[in-house]
Image (tube, grey):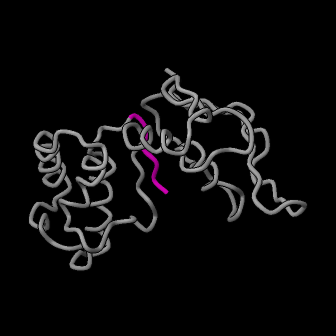
Amino acid sequence: MEIIKLSSVSHTYGKINENEMVLKSINLSYEQGKIYAIMGTSGSGKTTLLNIIGGLLKPSSGQVIINNEDITKYSARRRGKFRLNNIGYIFQNFNLIPFLNVEENILLPVRILKKDIKKCKEKCELLLSQLDITSKKNSYISELSGGQQQRVAIARALLNSPSVSFLL
């Protein structure tokens, strides 16, 4: 089953008369339950493409359809809400909040979405256990190794059971 479809997606960066086209008429689709890798040289548009698919960036033209919803028609705010509910992001630098502890970092999307925190805390405990970081639940990010920080980012990305996950 197709979960993501891009139709004629293009994106340009830059100022007027100094534009740099990074993506040009990209057409692709991804099926649910499969793992894909996007590969290319530095500066070829891999991150731009993932940011467009994930709704962090709106394409200059074209359509991005995820779960049968055209997210290119959404406002930035609505794309953000869609992303929180449907997409798990694990960033290369993890994007963890240093003044929050591990549990608070993992539960942050739940608090933003105003979901039932008690139910989500149970899933958080399960993820902490599965990722072998239960003992770090109350630790701050600066007290963790790089690998432990990565596992916190993974737990945060998986907490809402996203239909799509991106590892940048």
Look at the image and give the residue range highlighted in magenta.
163-168
Seen at 75% across and 34% down, the residue is 8
Question: Is 128 displayed left or right of 33 in the figure?
Answer: left
Horizontally, residue 147 falls left or right of residue 47, namely: left
Is 20 a magenta residue? no
Q: Residue at x 15, y 72 (%)?
A: 139
Looking at the picture, how far across and down is residue 156, in whole percent? Answer: 29, 53
Residue 141: x and y in percent read 25, 73
Identify which residue, 31 or 155, lies in the foreground: 155
Height in image: 142 above or below 25?
below
Which one is nearer the viewer's eye here, 78 or 28?
Answer: 78
**Direction right: furthest residue:** 17
The image quarter in which residue 117 lies: top left
| Number of marks drawn | 0
Q: Could you tell me what secondary structure mostly forms the magenta stretch?
A: strand
Q: Which quadrant holds residue 87?
A: top left
Picture layout, residue 160 above or below residue 109:
above
Q: Report the residue that reaches farthest toward the bottom.
A: 142
- In the image, what residue occupies the spot 23% across and 53% down? 107
Vertical position of residue 49 compared to residue 142: above or below: above
Position of residue 40 measured from the top left corner of the image (x, y, whole percent): 67, 56
